[in-house]
Amino acid sequence: MQIRNQTRTDTNPLLLKFLREAGEDPSILAIYHYGSSVTDESFRDIDLCIISSLVEKSAFFQRFLYYSGRYGASGEKPLDISLFSLLPLYIKVRVIGEGKILLMNDRDMLFNLVINYRTYN
């Protein structure tokens, strides 16, 4: 597990706890930080996208519900957690193009996925 790209939200204790737990999950390929909390000084939540290493969309869904329920709607700056495989294509392109990698468990697999989506940008 590699935690990368320090951002201004790094002091958020809920985010740090989420990243520590998610970093131990072998089915998580990467976590991207994207949206207004990356680009703007004022933001109401922290947008995060989980990219699962599981090919089948439904295979990771229970874990996604767990993370969303446990970390989703609490704190001063709540975490808005999404699952990459469920996002529309234009949002996937934004996540890959504008987002910051916070956690990466398999560099090669992530690189292959990013190359596929960058061709749309």
Image (tube, helix red, strand yellow):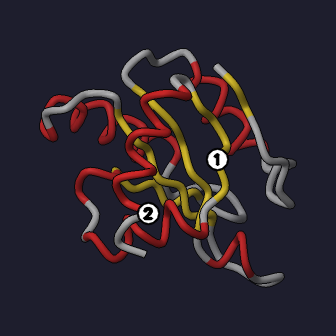
Q: Is residue 112 left or right of residue 8?
A: left
Q: Answer with the quarter of the image where residue 78 lies.
A: bottom right
Q: Amino acid at mark 1?
A: Ile
- Work out whether 90 lies above or below 110: below
67, 7: nearer the viewer: 7
Q: Is residue 113 left or right of residue 20?
A: left
Q: Is residue 23 left or right of residue 85?
A: right
Q: Amino acid at mark 2?
A: Arg
99, 41: nearer the viewer: 99
| Residue ID at (63%, 63%) | 46
Q: Which sits earlier in the primary sequence, circle 2 or circle 1?
A: 1
Residue highlighted by disc 2: 118
- Work out whether 26 lies above or below 48: above
Is residue 22 visible in the rendered structure shown here?
no
For the N terminus, the quadrant is top right
Task: Say which element carries label 2.
Answer: helix
Task: Say which element carries label 1.
Answer: strand
For the C terminus, the quadrant is bottom left
Query: Residue 104: x percent and y percent?
Result: 59, 31
Query: Residue 103: x percent and y percent?
Result: 63, 35
| Residue ID at (49%, 39%) | 111
Is residue 25 visible in the rendered structure shown here?
yes
Residue highlighted by disc 1: 101
